[in-house]
Image: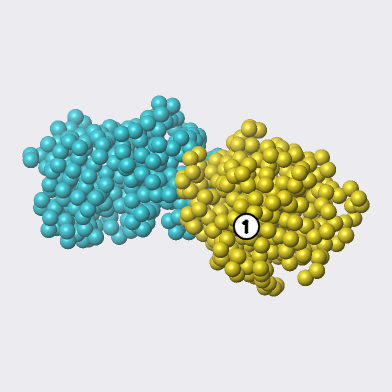
Chain colours: A cyan, B yellow
Amino acid sequence: MPFARPPSTLGENTLLPARPLKIAIVGAGAVGAYYGCVLARAGHDVHFLLRSDYAFVREHGYQVRTGQEDFRLFPAKVARSSAGIGPCDLVIIALKTTANAAFPELLPPLDDAGRTLFLTLQNGLGNVEALARLFPVRRLAAGLCFVCINRTAPGVIESYIQGRVQMAGVGPGAQGLARELAGLFAGAGIACRAMDSLDEVLWKKLCWNIPFNGLAIAAGGIATDKIAASPALMKLAHALMEELRAAALAHGIAIPDAFIVSQLNSLQGMGPYKPSSLVDYLGRRPVEVDSIWGEPLRRGQARGLPMSRLEVLHALLCHLVGDKC
Amino acid sequence: MPFARPPSTLGENTLLPARPLKIAIVGAGAVGAYYGCVLARAGHDVHFLLRSDYAFVREHGYQVRTGQEDFRLFPAKVARSSAGIGPCDLVIIALKTTANAAFPELLPPLDDAGRTLFLTLQNGLGNVEALARLFPVRRLAAGLCFVCINRTAPGVIESYIQGRVQMAGVGPGAQGLARELAGLFAGAGIACRAMDSLDEVLWKKLCWNIPFNGLAIAAGGIATDKIAASPALMKLAHALMEELRAAALAHGIAIPDAFIVSQLNSLQGMGPYKPSSLVDYLGRRPVEVDSIWGEPLRRGQARGLPMSRLEVLHALLCHLVGDKC
């Protein structure tokens, strides 16, 4: 398939070169593998940094299944270490946030003399801050993926709904960077929008993750269809969203009613989807408790908001997943 | 052992006759069996209404183990139906509240022409109201058992701490009734106090049951030592107690600081105690969700209190135990 990125409309002053990009996918779980495969299919030179799936994907490549189409990426370029990939134009970070302490080891070998862009697709709050300890903010961006993607077997990625990505830059020139990255994703066929405010995107994403990832675990390990079928849990999900909305407002972000309604309605048609945190919990892998529940709780409480429901959910999740908190 | 009840100090006008009493224990789980055995040892004519343990207890009696002493009640008078016991002086109800719908079937055959007293030792709110649909309130009382009693095997009852009972009457003459019942229990060697206010006793008991029975289940099925070792869970337990305290105050009951502190400290020295609700949950038996969490939540919310933390805990417990709520 030919290189499919539409020509930039931004003129000369762009951060990404107007050619197929060398892209590293750091943390090739379901989300990272999915976007890596789609970008590779669009003609980019995508390298996957892998641990557990390394041998399988090297031999078999990736199989991507969506409602609309299936496709295979073979061969897939895989590496066991960042040094084995080397400097890139773009690094897409889809690590579990529980592994963020590995940034200083994983990311610098991918940096091309201060030119490389770093895009985190991770959940929750605190990820951009962790990147900003290593790289200047003008090269940082965050993408929020409103998707239902699961890795159903080694090398097999399934995407259940027509997902979309909201892209936001971090530092000066954030809006231009967001537009460039949105163009890159859109050019690969991914519904993607550039947003003006990173904080708005982050808090909005939490409106889904905090209630639904959380209740899926705390209510006994249930998929989204069971949550949707329970008036008590949906009422609680709504109340959690309202707590978050107040915290967002205290940080200058106004979340409209319609957005809350859309998040509550989003479970319809999703079927028995297991949020990523539930998949991790059931698989006895680390759960992103601190970035999804802990950091938003601290930020809300720091503005004097009680966040009572979130406090309960956070304390229970810590114990259920075995974290110290 | 001779009849050990001290002479009443109430003069002629007492509700209980001054002789060994015929007592029925309805719901001979751990708590019912324990008090039945202790009252039988003190010389009363105690009949246990049993289902699952019937054959075992008929053959082997009861074995009671406490830190201080062990004793055996053999033979134990057991029955499979209320008609097999017949009219009593006193009926002690220690059924799970999830079985309260059986009151109209179980209790009338034990009533002696309007003379019998009914004492509920059950958890939570709503039990006295269920009894009051069948019998006049002047014959009703409630005892709150601050104890750690488990049935560790068929016919084997273990009591882990020096427990105590707070006794309160319901209708007119409540205080006299409470004193008579407290005297009965004290005469059998049970630390027991007559209380002026039933509501005070009920709300105070919830200050333990709501956080500790609830968190034991919702935090993953953990005993009290694990709760006590977690600052986050203890903070949450305290916050739940404060929500209850506000609800109690809205019902005219002032719960002092010292009581809250005593409840928080009560886990010290209790060891890995499994609250009764956790034992039921782990054994896949019905859990008393509505009387312990549901009814207090409704009563608090009816007075305009949000009870946010209790609301979360209640919704999660409903799902964990499989209740519709």
Question: Relative to B88, is A271 on the left or the right?
Answer: left
Give the residue at x 19% y 29%: A9
Question: Relative to B23, is A164 on the left or the right?
Answer: left
Residue B200 percent across, percent down from the top left: 74, 45
The answer for which chain carries disc 1 is B
Give the residue at x 49% y 57%: B282
Give the residue at x 43% y 44%: A215
Residue B54 can be seen in this image? yes
Which quarter of the image is occupied by the N terminus of chain A? top left
Give the residue at x 16% y 50%: A62
Q: How many marks?
A: 1
Corner quadrant of residue A43: top left
Helix, strand or loop at label 1? It is strand
Q: Nearer the viewer, residue B283 or A257?
A: B283
Q: Nearer the viewer, residue B189 or B213?
A: B189
Q: Residues within 10 Å of mark 1 (few under 14, many from 20)?
A: some
Corner quadrant of residue B245: top right
Residue at the spot of label 1? B79
Residue A210 percent across, percent down from the top left: 42, 42
Q: Nearer the viewer, residue B150 or B204?
A: B150
Residue B208 can be seen in this image? no
Q: Is residue B7 above or below residue A234?
A: below
Residue A233 percent across, percent down from the top left: 46, 39
Residue A138 percent across, percent down from the top left: 31, 42
Q: Is residue B159 above or below residue A262?
A: below
Which residue is the extreme one toward the right?
B11
Kind of residue indicated by mark 1: Ala
Q: Is residue B100 above or below residue B159?
A: above
